Image (spheres, rainbow, N blue to C red):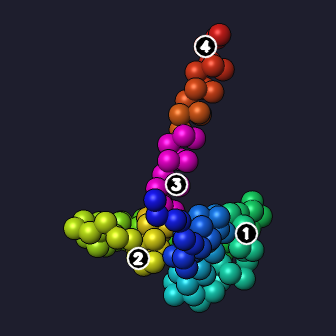
Amino acid sequence: MKAFQISKSHVFILCLFLLFFPIKTQFYNLIYIVSDAILHSGTISDIYTYNYLGFLIGCQEILETQKVLGDRFEFFHSVVFYFIYIFSVVASVILFKRIRDKQDFKLIDWILLAVFSFQLFDTLERLLDYILIAKYVAIETLPE
């Protein structure tokens, strides 16, 4: 029987697993900051505080940003959302091509898997929200 040995890759995978949400948050914050710097020269970064969820939040901040950006506000959020989605799809395609013929995962493969998992997690969370909202609406309107 072969003894189990802990290697650097095992420690890296464990850290990636334990730090999934903080890494996801910082990845999203980085996308928002870079997109804001490219599209609006830092206008949104002056208004918002980037939080631990990785999303821009705050009612007053949203109103102020809508006043400052006008119609470009929705465009900014669309660009960021689609960039994150496209980045995730590209990561999944690269990952699939890298591991299709071999069973050996390298560190870059784990990073690609994590980037793909960010969008997958958000999609599953959004789907669950839709299911729960539909269930709540059905429960609330059924007696009527």
Q: Is residue 123 above or below residue 143?
A: below
Quarter of image, res 57? bottom right
Q: Residues within 10 Å of mark 4 (few under 14, many from 20)?
A: few
Which x, y percent locates residue 11? Answer: 59, 73
Q: Residue at x 50, y 43 (%)?
A: 127
Judging depth in this view, the residue of 24 and 142 nearest the camera is: 24
Q: Residues within 10 Å of mark 2 (few under 14, many from 20)?
A: few
Disc number placed over residue 51 in the picture, else none: 1
Q: Earlier in the sequence, mark 2 or mark 3?
A: 2
Q: Main secondary structure of the magenta part?
A: helix
The residues tagged by marks 4 and 1 sit, at their Cα atoms, a distance apart of 38 Å
Q: Earlier in the sequence, mark 3 or mark 4?
A: 3
Disc number placed over residue 106 in the picture, else none: 2
Which x, y percent locates residue 12? Answer: 56, 75
Which x, y percent locates residue 48? Answer: 72, 74
Q: Is there CB contact under 8 Å for labels 3 and 4?
A: no
Say which amino acid is labelled 4: Leu
Disc 3 marks which residue?
Answer: 121
Q: Earlier in the sequence, mark 2 or mark 4?
A: 2
